[in-house]
Image (spheres, helix red, strand yellow):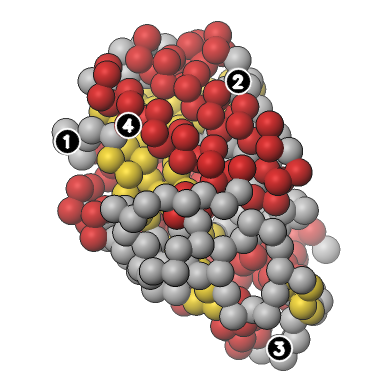
């Protein structure tokens, strides 16, 4: 049994990883300021989790959270491109200073491994697909800059302090417990929750923009694999499925699953959004033995089912 710290453990990705680690018999401490995460995300495992409600921008809180742990999954962030455009300083504080605080706390507590939730937004709008880790990063938003800076801190800490760190560059993660209600909601929860209520999904742009959508279980497994891999030295690896889907195709797939024919409403494209995204996942296969096992159609079906049940519960 290991003692795990998950920052951002009350958020979408963090709460799913928390459940998996508990199922695997580990103990979990969560550090979360509940800014976008919700205690309800941990309600069913509440008694098994040590929740520290606190801010990663506060060094002393990070030190307290890291003490006595064997691994840190650093997931907490202000995780939105549009929000970072409105509040760039906040994105920098939480995603850069907060990451530095967590790395320092891990170093001081002698935690051997830090697994960092990075972002494919680091690549920017490069026309070459698929995106490979040896391509030059060209972040297009304050969010992307801040997430890339976090990666570079992880890599520098591996270099100078000999800590084992790795950055998992997630592509578009989706699945149960992703917040559909935020003004910055990701597309799949936003589309599904509207469409189960017979409302039109809102697409920014023509809908032909594409993403490598990756079901949450694949991302959870990537975190576990990364933790268990030997000899990590600050690498950054893509975590996606290696397949891309357009927003128009998602609307069609949701309509098929629901037996509806709801048309999307189109609004102007948003600043900072990239046009196309697709992961090359060979490095993750090689370095951490990552293999996505839930493909997009199966992940979408599971997500629709989950959001449908939520809609029934809230009626
Ligand atoms: N969801 C995706 O598609 C995606 C893609 C690429 C990268 N990521 C990265 O994955 C991570 C998790 O994303 P998510 O989708 O679960 O988002 P989320 O907003 O659901 O989770 C982020 C969590 O961090 C917490 N948090 C924010 N600021 C904090 C602070 N100052 N101190 C402590 N806790 C704080 C929030 O309360 C929340 O629980 C983020 O680092 C994000 O950048 C996500």
Eye-nearest disc, 1 or 2: 2
What residue would you read off at disc 1? 230
Q: Earlier in the sequence, mark 1 or mark 3?
A: 1
Question: Which residue is located at x 50 percent, y 11 percent?
Answer: 64
In the image: residue 310, left or right of residue 177:
right
Q: CA distance from mark 1 to mark 2?
A: 30 Å
What residue would you read off at disc 4? 155
> Where residue 197 sits: x, y (%)?
79, 74
Q: Secondary structure at mark 2?
A: loop
Q: Earlier in the sequence, mark 2 or mark 3?
A: 2
Do the numbered discs 1 and 3 sit on residues whose CB atoms are within 8 Å?
no
What residue would you read off at disc 2? 57
Compared with residue 262, is residue 170 higher up or lower down, i.e. above or below?
above
Q: Secondary structure at mark 4?
A: helix
Q: CA distance from mark 4 to mark 2?
A: 20 Å
Q: CA distance from mark 2 to mark 3?
A: 46 Å
Compared with residue 39, is residue 307 higher up or lower down, i.e. above or below?
below
> Where residue 113 sits: x, y (%)?
30, 27
């Amino acid at each position: 049994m290991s003692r795990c710290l998950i920052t951002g453990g009350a958020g979408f990705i963090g709460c799913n990883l928390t459940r998996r680690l508990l199922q695997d018999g580990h103990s979990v401490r969560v550090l979360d300021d509940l800014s976008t995460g919700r205690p309800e995300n941990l309600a069913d495992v509440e008694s098994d989790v040590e929740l520290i409600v606190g801010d990663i921008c506060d060094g002393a809180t990070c030190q307290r959270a890291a003490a006595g742990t064997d691994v840190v999954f650093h997931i907490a962030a202000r995780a939105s491109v549009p929000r970072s455009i409105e509040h760039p300083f906040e994105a920098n504080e939480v995603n850069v200073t907060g990451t530095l605080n967590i790395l320092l706390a891990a170093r001081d507590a002698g935690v051997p491994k830090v697994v960092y939730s990075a972002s494919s937004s680091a690549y920017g709008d490069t026309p070459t697909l698929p995106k490979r880790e040896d391509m030059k990063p060209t972040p297009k938003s304050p969010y992307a800059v801040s997430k890339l800076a976090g990666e570079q801190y992880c890599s520098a800490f591996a270099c100078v302090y000999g800590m084992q760190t790795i950055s998992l560059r997630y592509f578009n993660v989706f699945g149960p417990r992703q917040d559909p209600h935020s003004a910055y909601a990701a597309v799949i929860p936003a589309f599904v929750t509207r469409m189960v209520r017979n409302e039109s999904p809102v697409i920014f742009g023509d809908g032909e923009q594409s993403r490598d959508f990756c079901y949450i279980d694949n991302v959870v497994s990537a975190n576990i694999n990364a933790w268990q891999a030997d000899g990590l030295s600050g690498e950054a690896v893509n975590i996606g499925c290696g397949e891309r889907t357009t927003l128009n195709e998602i609307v069609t797939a949701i309509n098929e699953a629901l037996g509806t024919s709801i048309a999307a409403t189109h609004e102007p494209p948003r600043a900072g959004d990239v046009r196309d995204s697709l992961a090359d996942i060979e490095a993750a296969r090689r370095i951490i033995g990552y293999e996505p096992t839930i493909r997009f159609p199966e992940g979408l079906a599971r997500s629709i089912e989950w959001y449908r049940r939520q809609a029934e519960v809230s009626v």
